[in-house]
Amino acid sequence: MVNEDEQVIGPFATNVSGTLADWFTANPVWATLIIAVLIVAAAWVAQLLTTRYLIEIISRITRRTSAGWDSVLRGRQVLSRLSRAVPLIIIRAGLPLLPLLPPGVADFLQRVLSAVIMIVIASAIAAAVSAFGDLYEKNPKSRQRPIKSYLQGLIIVIYALAAVAAVASLLNRDPLLILSGIGAASAILLLVFQDTILSLVAGAQLTGNDLIRVGDWIEMPAYQADGDVVEVALNTVKVQNWDKTFTVIPAHVFLKNSFKNYRTMYEIGRRIKRSILIDMDSIRFLTEEEISHLRRFSLLKDYIDAKLSDIADWNAKHEGAEDDPVNARRLTNLGTFRAYIENYLRADPRISNDLLFSIRQLAPDPDGLPLEVYCFTVDTGFVNFERTQADVFDHLLAIIDEFSLRVAQKPTGHDLRTLSTRVSAASLEA
């Protein structure tokens, strides 16, 4: 049984829809303007609902979680970029509804909007890739295995594919045909982008072989680079020098030129390699009184006792050693000083006993006899290393007089004034 209201409303609705259709047909200009306004309004409302409400709701939900990826996505504006495609999709869908818009023009505008939508979506995907990179950099392992160059290469591929799809949409062609055309022009592309391609391959080798990490101290004299690596990018490696300047080096250069990486020095130990110049005129055998004097040193007592026992055994086995000192073995002040340095450094907890350790003489020269200290410190920090090295040589230079040794150095003004005073005094006495 049909309701009386339905009997009245049905013909009325039909008449209204027919009247609107007739009016739109009779007034195409106004119909086009009204539909265009409605499409723009729908796109604006969709954009408003997406950005102000949907994204805001998602952001509020993710803020309550303990995961850190949500803040990274917000920082890179991934959802905001993706939301820009919503009004474009609505406008594209509404273009065929405009009465005065020719089908060919509507089709062309739809292809243009499709190309723009692809670029917008590509930018959102690229932002998501960058957000993943930001999230990865928070991991301690990122300093050992930086992936920024890989991500930058991936972003280039994303934009390249989006550009190919956009051009194919504009030309109304199959994207595979565009790619085949690009393949034909690959020689030109290789020539134009050769640095980028070389740097991409070099960056993969540098990170894959663990040659460079962010935070490494590297030295490349050819590019006047001497400092910490602060960034390993697709095309470049950024180095902050010790004078706080920056040196930007192409990544592929690291495969052509030699460079020094001090990473293992920080991981294992930092080397002390410094000499004290000994005045060779002060080197001599120790007397019995001097040996007794040096036995007071707790670091030398065991050494002197063992050495005297060894010397006594040797002298007893060799004829003439006990009759004339020139035929015997004896302790020297320089050898005892070397033993003191070794025992002193081995007793210092700041010096590593597990790495190469040597107190050695170098070839003498006109400046004296170099006595070199070669060892490694446990603390590899720059300031602590320099402090340890200075403490060691402060002590050695201060105690060298106990061994009747002199440090060789060129005459200073003080030496010349002292000599002049002595000469003047001698002249007056004469």
Image (cartoon, rainbow, N blue to C red):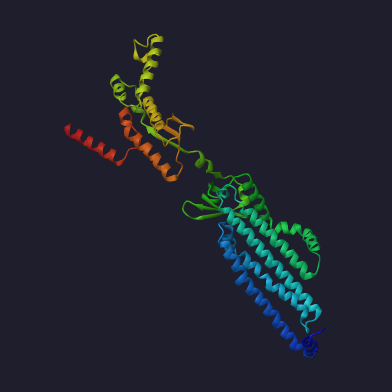
Q: Is residue 361 visible?
A: no
Residue drawn at (40%, 32%) of the image: 345
Residue drawn at (58%, 55%) of the image: 135
Count the numbered circles shown.
0
Q: Quadrant of residue 158?
A: bottom right
Q: Is residue 317 visible?
A: yes
Residue closest to the far left: 429
Indicate left or right for 182 with 228 as reference. right
Q: Quadrant of residue 45?
A: bottom right
Residue 367 versus residue 253 in the image, above or below: above
Indicate left or right for 363 with 84 as reference. left
Residue closest to the far front: 1
Residue 146 versus residue 289 in the image, above or below: below
Indicate left or right for 324 with 238 as reference. left
User: Which quadrant: the N terminus?
Assistant: bottom right
* Residue 418, position as x, y percentages in the image: 25, 37
Residue drawn at (36%, 22%) of the image: 302
Indicate left or right for 53 with 15 as reference. left
* Residue 36, position as x, y percentages in the image: 72, 82
Frontmost residue, 180 versus 374:
180
Residue closest to the far top: 319
Frontmost residue, 55 versus 202:
55
* Residue 282, position as x, y percentages in the image: 33, 27
* Residue 354, position as x, y percentages in the image: 48, 32
Frontmost residue, 118 versus 60:
60
User: Which quadrant: the C terminus?
Assistant: top left
